[in-house]
Amino acid sequence: MSSEKSIKNYRVHIGVLILAIIFWFMVKMNKEYDYALDIPLKVIINNEEICLKYPAPENVLVEFMGRGIDLFQLNFYDTAYEVDLSEERDKFTLNLSEHREYVKFSDDLDLQVKSVVRPHELDFELDTRREQKFPVKVLSTVDTEDGFIICGTYARPDSIVISGPATFLDTLKYINTERRDYEAANLAFHDQLSIAKNDHFFGEYSPGIVEVFFDVQRLAEKEIERVPVKVINVPAVYEVVPLPAMATVYVKGGEKILGEAEEENFEVLIDFEKEWEPGITHVKAFVKTDMNVSFVECRPAQFELLVQKKRNQ
């Protein structure tokens, strides 16, 4: 019996405590308070040909006055400081504290705007809006394990569209990603990188994230034999024959890339104007290729040139 009575008394005490808390909460919620809240700053521009030149602050600190219950509910409504710049064309200075009517909140709340705490004043500068596509430059470094090599970095999409002030877009040639560094890579991999937005100028970036493929391959080497040797920049008065007429190209790079490498992917060239002069018997050649390789050299390194004037010259 005593145990049941103790449990009963415990429940009574809990019930009384809950009622007291509810009563206290109701009393507090019906009192008047001042409450400062950061709300979004929304800039409205209905003219599609105009945009902000510089980004505006994200928030405005506003002090409200009202009952506790309304101030509490304020956190669950869409509230903002709205500035309409649709009719502006150049520069516009706004004293926020003089325009408390720009604070927009639900009519269901019985509140007053007491003051705008910060910022007190904002300068808005407008510019002609332009939309333009720019290539993406990946700002990442990849350190590989021994025996591996990074053969390429490819963003998808490889370009993005920026909509913003013409003054800003005129300064761009490409757009960077965020910087991210990787270590001890031994496999090709993908990652998502955000576009590095310019904090000084206003701009809308689409898309804001790109998928990047890092082409890590095992390091390989290969010899490409019987590549023809060509002599370039030969004056019309000369006939020139390189000896030997064929060369071997030694190349290092990713194993998948070298697996597709053939003699037609390489040119062994001798620049006659640069390398030869009377009395010179041996000259250097260089290798030209469009393949993404890390090292390439010609074997032999030097060639003999048979030079003679053409007849009737």
Image (cartoon, grey):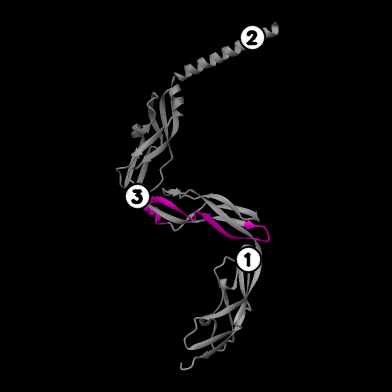
For this orientation, the residue located farthest to the bottom is 312
Q: Identify the residue shown where x is 56% and y is 67%.
A: 291
Secondary element under disc 3, as helix, strand or loop, is strand
Q: Would you say residue 228 sits in the magenta stretch?
A: no
On the picture, is 125 further left or further right than 250? left
Predominant SS along the magenta part: strand
Q: Residue 182 location, x and y as percent?
A: 61, 53
The quarter of the picture where residue 249 lies is: bottom right
Whichever of labels 3 and 1 marks the residue nearer the N terminus, that label is 3
Whichever of labels 2 and 1 marks the residue nearer the N terminus, that label is 2
19 vs 155: above or below: above
Query: Which quarter of the figure is the N terminus placed in?
Result: top right
Identify the amino acid type marked 3. Asp
Secondary element under disc 1, as helix, strand or loop, is helix
Q: Which mark is residue 144?
A: none
Q: Residue 250 location, x and y as percent?
A: 64, 72
Q: CA distance from mark 2 to mark 1?
A: 84 Å
Identify the amino acid type marked 2. Lys
Q: Between 82 and 307, which is closer to the camera in this rendering?
A: 307
7 vs 195: above or below: above
Q: Which mark is residue 8?
A: 2
Identify the amino acid type marked 1. Gly
Q: Identify the residue shown where x is 64% and y is 63%.
A: 255
Q: Would you say residue 144 sits in the magenta stretch?
A: yes
Whichever of labels 2 and 3 marks the residue nearer the N terminus, that label is 2
What span is in magenta? Answer: 143-171
- Which mark is nearer the camera, 2 or 3? 2
Q: Which residue is mark 1?
A: 259
* Disc 3 to disc 1: CB gap under 8 Å: no
Q: Which residue is mark 3?
A: 127
